[in-house]
Image (tube, rainbow, N blue to C red):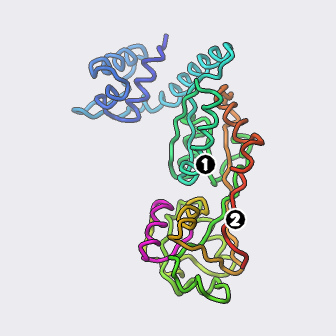
Amino acid sequence: MLLIPELLTFLAAAETENFSEVARRLGISQPSVSMQIRALESRMGVELFHRSGRSVTLTEAGQALVPLARALATQAVHAEEAMASHTGEIVGRLRIVCTTTAGKYLLPQLVSGLLNRHPMVSVECQVVHRGLAIERLCDGQAQLGITSLREGSDDTLEYRPFVTDRIALITPVDHPWTTREKAITPADLATERFILREDTSGTQHAVREALAWHDIDVDDLHPVMTMGNAEAIRMAVQERIGVGFVSVLVAREAVDAGHLAIVPVKGLDITKTLYMIRDRRRPATPAQTAFWDYAFAPENELLRELPNLIGAA
């Protein structure tokens, strides 16, 4: 019979490829890790890892076991949480995967409200790029996701629009564009240096699509830097390296403090939809259902309706 602790140890080893790291993560000794892996291999009748010094790598059999072990461990956790919830309390660990903007500017408020209601729930937030967010949701590493990427069949994933995020052009407060009598046009953008997001970013995808309607390629903007997150762009703009497009969620604090300005661009309205996502193929845990219901509750309507800091152009 398979033992859940051994499967959890195996999954940690598959992820880290280092038994010492597994021991540290699980709070057990390294010999105990090795013993559990050996016991599981003996029970399975196959080697699950190639061992070379301190490092280990999955064998073909080990690779095949990963999704099966993850599914079994998840079901065991779901069973424990479901039984605990019959006491009247929502109990369990909720894993949420999201992109940077959602993770920094939306999730903290949602998680705070959820924990006030259900203090026996614990939440793990994984902030990754949007493609990896979908991947982790589909393979069961997360129960809920928030991302602008929509992929796969609706029969597999349920996408519910959560927030319409507006993308703003930010500049230093004394930039010449902030005092022009007439609004700048998309063609004017080519005269300035730009700090851009990486190509996998939802913001970059939205900017690229919006500019394409005006027959402008992102490369026409004279990019001088590419940054991995919106906060880095905001700081680079404050340092006068160039201008850039970021979410109003990211820009709002610096604009309110007078460190940056938002410049409307005539005919350019850039938005992206952030979806709350769950896998239809897997039964929802009580904690997962509680978060989903709370996120879309009337009391969070103001959170879902972001302010428009971009003036008419």
Q: Earlier in the sequence, mark 1 or mark 2?
A: 1
List the residue tagged with mark 2: 308
Question: Where does the image place residue 114, in percent across and percent down from the top left?
Answer: 63, 34
Q: Per the image, is 251 magenta?
A: no
Q: Are marks 1 and 2 in contact (CB under 8 Å)?
A: no
Question: Where does the image place residue 290, in percent across and percent down from the top left?
Answer: 69, 31
List the residue tagged with mark 1: 106
Image quadrant of residue 261?
bottom right
Which segment is the magenta one? 228-245
205 vs 88, left or right, is left
The residue under the point 54% across, 29% down is 122
Residue furthest left in the image: 53
The residue under the point 65% across, 70% down is 209
The amino acid on which the numbered mark 1 sits, given as a three-letter code, is Leu
The amino acid on which the numbered mark 2 sits, given as a three-letter code, is Asn
Label 1: few (<14), some or many (≥20) within 10 Å? some
25 vs 164, left or right, is left
Residue furthest front in the image: 257
Image quadrant of residue 272?
bottom right
Q: CA distance from mark 1 to mark 2?
A: 16 Å
Which type of secondary structure does the marked residue at label 1 adopt? loop
Residue 22, compared with residue 194, is above or below; it is: above
191 vs 28, left or right, is right
